[in-house]
């Protein structure tokens, strides 16, 4: 069960967290949106889904109470629960028609337009953003999505991890190989605190990242063990989920199946499994037969 988080919380002298007020199975308590800095203009990192007036009101209240405004908006990745409220914020809570809105450009497809004449400023790995009281560096951490960025806050040795690492549970990903590389990069950075895209603050970052890596390798080992017990048998991703994810609620099985398929694609590249297709068009997999 997800822990209860306040709608607004001052996490440090330069970081305020605002919940997106969009709770759900994949968003946990809601998307974490962060106001960063100490001055009269601050950086807003991520937003919420569109049409969530409580989030917008909470952001408006924080800006008023702290006598500050939004300098620019940074986005960890393209998912709607992170970018969806950008047009409403720019229309209702800023005094700038050309508010800088920065993210990494998607690789697999074009980024969907923001609407209202707004445009993304596409940035590269290592781009530095400065505001009074805070210095943020973009860190390219793909895997969850192909455009995923984390942001390193120099003054706190803190990492805003987006959806690469969550405060509770584990993350889903589009590409297992690059996701594992991103986890290894984050581990090398040795942050002392992680501000995640969903869930509570992570105060044991190195331990948490190691847990994520170990968890993913455990899943891979479980997949191989199932194949060992069913040698020569082709199985679908969902077949594997029903055997392995016995403690996962059934309504989340489709997401678990996505993760299993990514594991299998990695194993296929490593020549450890082979792929076939049923008449119904389902992708099927089995352990690579030894000659």
Image: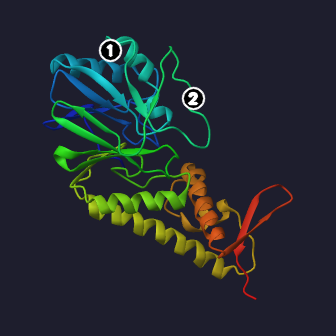
Q: Gap in Å between the C-alphas at discs 2 and 1?
A: 22 Å
Q: Earlier in the sequence, mark 2 or mark 1?
A: 1
Residue depicted at x 29% and y 58%: 189
Q: How is the image coloured?
A: rainbow
Disc 2 versus disc 1: nearer the observer? 2
The answer to whether 213 is drawn above or below residue 110 in the figure is: below
Q: Are marks 2 and 1 in contact (CB under 8 Å)?
A: no
Quadrant of res 89: top left
Element class at badge 2: loop
- Label 2 CA crowd tier, 10 Å (few <14, some 14–19, many 20+): few
Residue depicted at x 65% and y 59%: 238
Mark identifier at residue 164 = none
Indicate the position of residue 73 as horizontal and vertical percent values.
Answer: 35, 28
Mark identifier at residue 93 = 1
- In this rendering, would 118 be left or right of 69? right
- In this rendering, would 59 be left or right of 21? left
Residue underneath mark 2 = 112
| Front one among 218 and 158 | 158
- In this rendering, would 142 be left or right of 100? right
Quadrant of res 39: top left
The answer to whether 93 is drawn above or below residue 227 in the figure is: above
The answer to whether 176 is drawn above or below residue 147 in the figure is: below
Element class at badge 1: loop
Residue depicted at x 40% and y 26%: 101
Indicate the position of residue 132 as horizontal and vertical percent values.
Answer: 17, 30
């Amino acid at each position: 069960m997800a822990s209860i988080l306040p709608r607004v919380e001052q996490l440090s002298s330069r970081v305020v967290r605002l919940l997106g007020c969009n709770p759900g199975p994949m968003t946990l308590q809601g998307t974490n949106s962060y106001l960063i800095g100490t001055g009269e203009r601050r950086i807003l990192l991520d937003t919420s889904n569109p049409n969530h007036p409580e989030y917008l009101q909470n952001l408006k209240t924080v800006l008023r109470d702290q006598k500050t405004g939004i300098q620019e908006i940074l986005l960890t990745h393209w998912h709607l629960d992170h970018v969806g409220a950008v047009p409403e914020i720019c229309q209702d809570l800023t005094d700038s028609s050309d508010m800088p809105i920065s993210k990494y450009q998607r690789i697999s497809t074009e980024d969907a337009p923001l609407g209202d004449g707004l445009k993304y400023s596409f940035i590269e790995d290592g781009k530095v953003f400065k505001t009074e009281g805070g210095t943020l560096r973009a860190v390219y951490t793909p895997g969850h999505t192909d455009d995923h960025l984390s942001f390193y806050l120099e003054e706190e040795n803190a990492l805003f991890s987006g959806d690469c690492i969550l405060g509770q549970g584990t993350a889903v990903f589009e590409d297992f190989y690059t996701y594992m590389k991103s986890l290894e990069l984050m581990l090398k950075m040795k942050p002392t605190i992680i501000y995640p895209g969903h869930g509570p603050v992570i105060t044991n970052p190195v331990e948490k990242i190691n847990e994520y890596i170990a968890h993913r390798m455990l899943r891979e080992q479980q997949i191989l063990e199932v194949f060992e017990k069913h040698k020569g048998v082709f199985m679908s991703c969902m077949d594997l989920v029903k055997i392995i994810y016995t403690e996962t609620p059934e309504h989340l099985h489709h997401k678990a199946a996505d993760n299993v398929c990514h594991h299998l694609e990695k194993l296929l590249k490593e020549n450890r499994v082979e792929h076939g297709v049923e008449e119904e068009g389902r992708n099927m997999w089995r352990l690579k037969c030894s000659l």
